Amino acid sequence: MSETNELRIAVIGAGPAGVYSSDIFLRQLGKLGEELGLGTKARIDLFEKLPVPFGLVRYGVAPDHPSIKFIASALEKTLDNPDIHLYCDVEFGKDVTLDELLERYDAVLFATGAVEDKPLGLPGADLDGVYGAAKFVEWYDGYPTGAREWPLDAEEVAVIGGGNVAMDVARELMRNADDLKERTDIPDNVYEGIKANKAKTLHLFIRRGVAQAKFSVQELREMEKLPGVQLIINEDDFDLDDDTIEEAGKDKLTRQMVEELFAIREMAEDMEDDGDTDFEGNPADRKYYIHFNSAPVEVLGEDGKVKAIRVEKTTTSADGKMTRTGEFEEYPVQAVYHAIGYKPASAPGIAYDDRRAHLANANGDGRITTEASGEGAQVRERLYATGWAKRGPVGLIGSTKSDALLIVTNMLEDLSKAAEGGRVAADRDPESIDRLLASRGVKPIDFAGWKKVDAFERAEGAKEGREHKKVIDPEQMRALAHA
């Protein structure tokens, strides 16, 4: 038996939150470990239910985000660390239990992300042709257990949402398939699907005003460069009062977003003046309407299928308070996509805060509690949450770094107070987890296995003059990784 004296940490989820936390834990331990009485050595085992790592970066963001390649390569560099051990294709709660982890690890950190949509909650939400963004994103990102085909036969489409996911969905629905293929890693089924897409008119509905949207400037710039697409706005939406302009100016990111939206307003005017063209002055064959202060209230149907969407005009004050006006308009559409937020995943044996949609943790500090809130909520030792699992589905990928630093600081503080410098797991044999999984017939995919999948994807992409081409079949991934 090869017992070791290093700290042992289990991380559940190999997306950005899990990988950043692993990296920051090792760095902070290196800096502070001696003075905290913890030493500077730790082994981190990173468990991921999918056959490949990177979670949200690979499967939750539109394929045409240029910044994603940089994030993925940074995450990969982190995983190429002898103190971090990747266990893909291992599902927490099914292949390994919480008690089994606590027996072998000094602390367990949940970085489980989100895979489900918040329900739309409008009359008509159950009609044929209403889709949650999460499932559509799974399709175009080639999620291993996602749909392989997608019905893109609606000529008029609505997208509901004022954040980046809504922008992603709208952009992919307006995309030219050849243009998308040329610059991304989309698999063949997605290329064929988008090539056959019949959408000619898209309406994006944002409940609040121009200054309250949650778009990143990056998203807006990608929206501006869609071949064959004319952007159309309502001039009245941009008539902001002085208080709203002043409020927007207080936050740098909001100010930049508003400035970019005003640039889009000018673009839209030029497109109209030039005879309904796209951003390059070419004739546009698709129209993309951006509606602010527009709250959908009902999806209208006929014979069980979507036929229109009913929208109420709203007004938004400088402090972001939305007021309904009682003025309604109907738009003919045959499909409705809602991107109104994700519901972070639950974890077996861990309490869930339904109101805030995340794992129950103490005052947002990442320490897991016995229940969501109230006087009975007790901190559960050695259990932590980070990323969306900790705070709910808000914030960009970069927010997970500041999250990770906070959680890691708390973990180190707690470990330093624990007996024997935090080394509390009874079973300290690093090979114990491998024997346990092998006894169940579970074959984890490690970092070397992922690199084989990645090499194959690069080789397949190179055949078509592309950097990468995604493998989407989980069985093929397993075969490549274990070859």
Image (cartoon, rainbow, N blue to C red):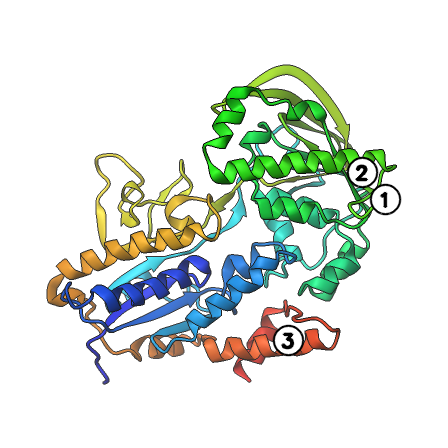
User: What's the residue type where badge 2 is placed?
Assistant: Met
- Kindly identify the amino acid type of the residue bearing the numbered disc 3: Arg
Point out the image quarter for the C terminus: bottom right
Give the mark nearest the N terminus, 2 or 3. Answer: 2
The residue singled out by tag 2 in the image is 271
Neighbours of disc 1 within 10 Å: few (<14), some (14-19), many (20+): some
Question: Which is closer to the viewer, label 2 or label 3?
Answer: 2
Return the mark for residue 285. Answer: 1
From what the image shows, is residue 56 above or below residue 162? below
10 Å neighbourhood of mark 2: few (<14), some, or many (≥20)?
A: many
Tell me the residue at 62%/52% (across/down).
137
Answer with mark 1 or mark 3, whichever residue precedes in sequence: 1
Q: Is residue 6 visible?
A: yes
Residue placed under numbered mark 3 in the picture: 458
**Tag 1 or tag 2, which sits nearer the N-term?**
2
> x, y percentage for residue 478?
55, 76
Q: Quadrant of residue 355?
A: top left
CB under 8 Å between discs 2 and 1? no
**Residue 133 seen in the figure:** no
